[in-house]
Image: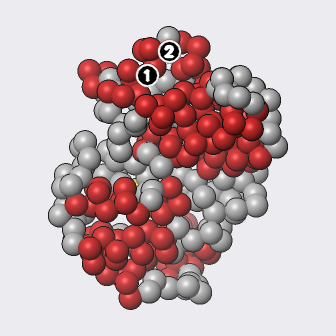
Amino acid sequence: MFTPARKKLLLAVLVLSFGVQTGLVYSDARSEPLSEAAREGRALWQRHACQTCHQLYGQGGFLGPDLTHAASRVDSTRLVSLLTVGSGQMPPLGFSDAESAAMATFLREMDRPEIGRGELRMGTPGEGAGAQAAFERAMEATLGAGAPGGAGSGDGPDQDLAEVAAGFEAYRIRPCSACHFPFRDSPVGAPDLSLVAGSLAADSLDQVLAEGRPLMGMPPPVPPLDEAGRAAITAFLDFLSANREQLDAATRAFAADRRLDWGALPWWEYP
């Protein structure tokens, strides 16, 4: 049973804790504030309630993909298309060229390299990162080293790896990672992509890449994949399957010892 004196002491400690927290948050130094163009993009983000569906630095909704690192993954043509005509569950916003440019600037300045990459921007570019960013780094390192693995049926290893790299890039610029996790099934039921090549026949995989599986919750790829694009994605999935153990280990290594740089997070630059 707390005595009146102990209750007062506990209340004083709680008030002091909140005071210290408030001081730390509001004294967060930002050496690179948003530019005027980025602030216009932030205003559009707020006006259209983008955070209802999308996350930045782990804050926001879960209906759409995390946009923390969108500037590094979505090319300008694709971004303009999304902001004007929409895609799937994303409604058309009808952005003008100026508005699209402002939003692109906002996303680019939020994607600051000193904060790192990944779902919650854990780590720095040279250290730990979120699972998706760690997987991308593992793929880049493995492709750069010319790793052997059952990829493609081209005229030689260099050609095979070039097709794998093209497939990896096609995967990376699309919102595939919003549902698919590297080396494990996702909470929404999307399968582990490193096992897809062994579980689907070639013609079935090609059909999925062309049409999706709408009845199972997978929309068609956006932007659509032509025959060459589907072949490249297939080569990437074959490579992922053939080098699964190596890539999984590399991903874990890149994601190890994750640290969050609280001072680098621009807490009040977005809702």
Q: From the image, tell me which residue sits under label 1.
A: 206
Residue depicted at x 50% and y 43%: 170
Q: Secondary structure at mark 2?
A: helix
Q: Position of residue 225 (x, y in %)?
A: 40, 37
| Image mark for residue 165 | none
CA separation in Å, label 1 and label 2: 6 Å
- Looking at the image, how many numbered discs can be counted on the residues? 2
Horizontal relation, residue 109 to residue 161: left or right: left
Label 1 close to label 2 by CB (< 8 Å) = yes
Q: Is residue 135 or residue 202 the one in the foreground?
A: 202
The amino acid marked with disc number 2 is Ala
Rendered position, 25 above or below 87: below
Horizontal relation, residue 237 to residue 157: left or right: left
Q: Residue furthest front?
A: 155
Residue depicted at x 82% and y 43%: 145
Residue depicted at x 47% and y 36%: 229
Q: Quadrant of residue 147?
A: top right
Residue depicted at x 76% and y 32%: 157
The amino acid marked with disc number 1 is Asp
Q: Secondary structure at mark 1?
A: helix
Q: Position of residue 108 (x, y in %)?
A: 48, 71
Q: From the image, tell me which residue sits under label 2.
A: 202
Q: Residues within 10 Å of mark 2 (few under 14, many from 20)?
A: few
Q: Is residue 37 or residue 24 the one in the foreground?
A: 37
Is residue 135 visible from the viewing direction of this image? no
Horizontal relation, residue 180 to residue 125: left or right: left
